[in-house]
Image (spheres, helix red, strand yellow):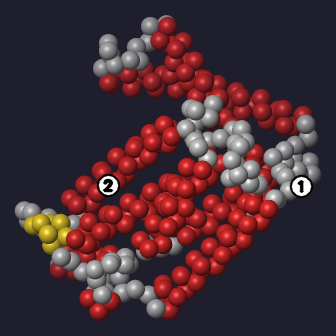
Amino acid sequence: MNNRFVINYTPGPTPFHKLTGFTKVFLFLAMICAIMWTFDIRILIPLLLINCAEIVSMKPNYKPILIVFAITFVTVTLIGNVMLFAVSPEAGYNNVGAEHIIWQGSGSHYISKEFLWYIFVVFIKRTASFSSVMAFALSTTPSEFASGLNHCGLPYKVCTVVSLAYRTIPDIANDFVNIRNSMMMRGLELSGRKASVWKRLKNYVLLLIPLIFTAFGKVGNIANAMDLRGYGKNKKRTWYAEREPGKLDRIIRTLTVLLFAAVIYYVIRYRIIDPWPAKFWCPWLARDEVQHVNTLDTIKILQWFRNR
């Protein structure tokens, strides 16, 4: 099952797998906050390297990770950058605060060094977020995830819903394969050899109907089983995946607290007290070369209304 899905359903043998659920959730939240609150490449690259080292240390099956990354890269990065160049080639100036044109196209389309730096920093930020999510998913089982969320203060009923949602993913995938094979044996064409794309799409819509009914039937069975076992009677509950924190847990939690403190210091020091003039730091620009840009002034539709 671990070879087909990025999510782990059984505990792994590596030290990161053996951390408690609360430690993993706490570390994941710290990483996400640190990545979200900055566009500074000097901070994003170390966070990316930490996440990549964590993934490599767990010795996962890289195939599903690379597939998900490739899909994300094509749909978000490549297509997004092409659309950004077509709509807003001045994005580099708006975020970096300067502009050095290296290629001038027709009309208002051009490429600047700052535009390339902007898309590079955004790519690193997205990759760091992706690697953080992958590291967390590879090291955490649904039960550990629910236990960690509960220790963070989330009600255990909500945590159970999250755990059940993760655990139904392989069941839904297996039901999808079984229903698809059954309908193909009955003559429904779902391959690309004999049917057009439009016809296959319509046939897949027909496939989703029994899949939805099957999923709802399983939800009813799970709900009845939990009611018969008295689920929700008490205000608190224990967790099957819960265990006492070890030495590595205490080390990781201490480092996570230090990471939170560093992020808070960075936000206060470099975003509030003495912020960089532009949104993005750029290595070849000095502070006095960076211009303050009001993002609202660069929106073309607002410029049109003002000129009217």
Query: Are circles 2 and 1 on residues that touch, CB within 8 Å?
Result: no
- Residue 300: which quarter of the image? bottom left
Q: Helix, strand, or loop for circle 2?
A: helix
Spatial distance from mark 2 to mark 1, Cα to Cα? 46 Å
At 7% from the left edge and 62% from the top edge, which residue is drawn? 106
Residue 130 % position (x, y):
50, 54
At 74% from the left edge and 54% from the top edge, which residue is drawn? 19
Disc on the earlier residue, 2 or 1? 2
- Does residue 154 sit above or below 190 in this rendering? below
Whether residue 302 is visible, yes or no, is no
Residue sitting nearer the eye, 196 or 290: 290
At 77% from the left edge and 55% from the top edge, which residue is drawn? 20
- Farthest left residue in view: 106
Residue 293 % position (x, y):
30, 83
- Residue 231: which quarter of the image? top right
- Identify the disc placed on residue 236: 1
- Image check: 263 left or right of 258? left
- Does residue 62 sit above or below 179 in this rendering? below
Callout 2 amino acid: Gly
Q: Helix, strand, or loop for circle 1?
A: loop
The residue at which mark 2 appears reads as 80
